[in-house]
Amino acid sequence: MSKVKSSETVKVVIRCRPLNRKEEAAAAGVTRTPGGVGGIVEMDMRLGQVVLRNPRGPPGEPRKTFTFDSVYDPSSKQRDLYDETVRPLIDSVLDGFNGTIFAYGQTGTGKTYTMQGVWLEPEKRGVIPNAFDHVFTQISRSAADRQYLVRASYLEIYREEIRDLLDPNVHAPHVPNVHTHTQRTLELRESPESGVYVRDLTSCVCKSVKEIQELMNVGNQVRSVGATDMNEHSSRSHTLFLITVECSLPGPDGRQHIRVGRLNLVDLAGSERQAKTGVHGERLKEAAKINLSLSALGNVISALADGRSGHVPYRDSKLTRLLQDSLGGNAKTVMVATLGPAPQHYEETLTTLRYANRAKNIQNQPRVNEDPKDALLREFQKEIARLRAQLSHREGRGKHRKEDGEEGWDGEGDEEGEEEVEKERMLQEERLEEEKEAIREDGSLLAEEKQRLLGEKERMMGDLRKERDATEQLTAKYKHRYNKSAPPLPGSRPHPSREAGPIPPGKPAPSLPGSRPHPSREVGPTPPGKSAPPLQGSRPHTALITTLGIIDTAD
């Protein structure tokens, strides 16, 4: 069920960086207009206007004026932009809307500074670290009848290839600024429920600001960056950090409803001119791919802003496919266009302003994502309820004994619940074997297609086995809270600690029996480091809830 909201336009803001030392020296003889920012750009923050002067035009040439939702001159603070422009968007994501923030502009104009900033200096922290704090602070202050599950993914588009920055296989020692060729390339898929997604993208459950920051730090270690004549730390790829926030809350009907908000934090690589950046070789190939994808983004913006075009070329690049919902779809979107004020960058600054001016006219249709079919929190809650009911049934009918002042099972308790689950798994495995045999005997299939189908069936059987092992471990841990001397369940593997607690560092969250994990929702490994303490003001989590990564806000 989705609550439909009226259309709204993409919110566009402009930010101009100050002149650097080289530009100040070159513009030493340029007369600055009072109230301007120097160079060729003037800003009126009260009116939201940007005035651009052509440095090579005749004295009487009119200046070009553009009006936007907000403008920020070089003296503006990181926190000003966040509080005025980004904070309302994050609040909407926590209410179940999709949200996107992306920075667009020429290379060296401050896109990465705006999005990430300087993490260790509070006044210079960018949009992304401030958003992390915002999300978990709001969760800790939420009503006691709400539960949350927060997941994060991190990817880059490098030369039109999608790469998982949290893939544990790529976090090996590497040479700085040299991109490893062992990273696997991921594929885009599309579904009616979740739209465009990345297949097999790692998704990690996060329970604190510290954990999600560690994820970004891990991803940044393998992100593609390099030096050019215009930027010593130039982004050589587009990156997208995705945060999924699932919230369970009671509805007017007295039942629990789940809302899922998705936040896309996009740091685009900047457009480049080879004559100015001085790149060659691999850097030149990277620049060509960057410019090609940004050109495709500009074409999508133009088609949507025009309103008369029946075709929007989303499929022209991986970037525009990933931003399909953010531009003209189900999302609230903020575009931060960054400018350079130096006279030598007049053409690039004018192009950025024109694209930003067109983006103001894009109409989105954001709506609350309520009770989606692929909500992972709902599956976790069902698993908790099933295990509690099963253990309660065993406790009620099993024979108890008391030894050394401790209660325990005598091993002859009721096993009906487990037997039913195991029987269902065996039936599923039998069906998969029958389907595999039918595929092998089907002479109408091509060899490649037959191999592909058999591979899919093998993966499904592997998932069933993993779910069985995870459930046995989870049940054993949960039962252990009631009876420290209880023997392990038949066929289960002993847990290393036999104690319930947070997900151990580097271990994946358990899969759910009977459920098919969504390709883009697979729970990946928890980032390295110590597990975070409970949020301030929250009650201690039960072992099962903590293990599954659910944030319970009840007091």
Image (cartoon, grey):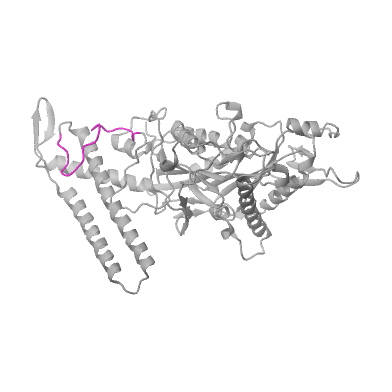
Horizontally, residue 403 falls left or right of residue 174, namely left
Horizontally, residue 19 falls left or right of residue 288, namely right
Extreme-bottom residue of the structure: 444
- Regarding residue 305, the answer to whether it shows in the image is yes
In the image, 359 versus 442, the foreground residue is: 442
* Residue 242 in the image, given as x and y percentages of width and height: 49, 44
Horizontally, residue 172 falls left or right of residue 356, namely left
Q: Residue at x 17, y 38 (%)?
A: 488
Residue 505 sits in quarter: top left
Q: Residue at x 41, y 42 (%)?
A: 169
- Regarding residue 330, the answer to whether it shows in the image is no
Residue 44 sits in quarter: top right
Give the number of marks.
0
Q: Residue at x 29, y 38 (%)?
A: 544
In the image, 493 versus 1, the foreground residue is: 493
Is-magenta flag for residue 419? no
* Residue 96 in the image, given as x and y percentages of width and height: 48, 46
Vertical relation: 121 (above or below) 335? above
Is-magenta flag for residue 497? yes
Vertical relation: 194 (above or below) 523? below
Q: Residue at x 27, y 65 (%)?
A: 435
Task: Give the residues in magenta.
Answer: 486-504
- Name the main secondary structure of what is drawn in magenta: loop
In the image, 180 versus 550, the foreground residue is: 180
